[in-house]
Amino acid sequence: MADAERPVSMKQADELVELGKQSSRYANPNPDRVDCPSAHTLRAMALRSRQLSLTDAPIAHVANCSPCYQQYCRYREEEIQRSRRRYAAFAICAAAAIIVAVLIGRNVLRSPASNSKPSIVDRRPTQEKEKGPAAESPQPQLLALDLSHISPSRGDDEPGQKAQGLVMPAKALKLEVVLPVASPPGSYELGVFSVAHIMQHSAKGTATLDKGVTRLSVSTDLTSLKSGAYLIGVRTALSDWMFTPVTIR
Ligand SMILES: [Zn+2]
């Protein structure tokens, strides 16, 4: 593109404005508007239209014709005002968009948070509430205890190999005890003794006979007992204790 065909640049237009200011608005009266360009051309120049090439821009004429210069200045001022309004409108729109975005963001953040946070807050105390009483009175651990091998005649005199495997945790327990063979159903007492036969803990329950097996269901709480070797004993109201070793951990 030849220089003459280039659009009027901002710099060139500004230079023209300065030139016009210097020559004054009224230094070159042209009351008959001789050789004046059309209003469309002056406006295109004022608007920095890319459609107007440097060759077509009547720069020299405007600089030497006060009416054209004034007209050009008017168009230019209008364009500047329009640009300011456009910018102001854009700024207002941008500000409004930002405000809307912020409000939406706050609502988006607030609603899930306000829905989830209290539910977490509510849930945790609930868990702690569940945990609190549970620590005081924990759900008993179900434990099967096979005492079918013990008998009054053997007792602690002959603890036996089978008894060595008996282990009970120092917890609240719900024991399902298989009583010695041929034990009658009915009320039983189950005791935990030190190895010196001092009762540490006892609990009572009712045994039932089921398919030849006598089973005693009894709840007990061994949390107060230290870990170590103990004896576990069972008896009816009419019988002596039958002991067998047990390890409490
Ligand atoms: Zn003119």
Image (spheres, helix red, strand yellow):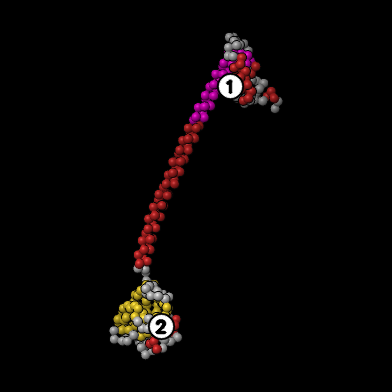
Asked if the residue at tag 1 contacts the one at tag 2, i.e. Cβ–Cβ closer than 8 Å, the answer is no
Decide which of 59, 5 is in the foreground and name it: 59
- Please tell me whether residue 60 is drawn above or below residue 233 in the rendered image: above
| Residue, disc 2 | 245
Magenta-colored stretch includes residue 82:
yes
Report the amino acid beneath label 1. Answer: Ala
Furthest-left residue in view? 237
- Badge 2 marks a residue whose secondary structure is strand
- For residue 148: magenta? no
Q: Which mark is nearer the camera, 2 or 1? A: 2
Measure how far apart labels 2 and 1 are at the Cα level: 110 Å
Dot 1 corresponds to which residue? Answer: 46
Q: Position of residue 185 (x, y in %)?
A: 31, 83
Within the image, what quadrant is residue 7 found in? top right
Q: Quadrant of the C terminus?
A: bottom left
Q: Is residue 27 above or below residue 179?
A: above
Magenta-tinted stretch: 61-89
Determine which quarter of the picture holds residue 127. Answer: bottom left
Residue at 42% in and 76% down: 227
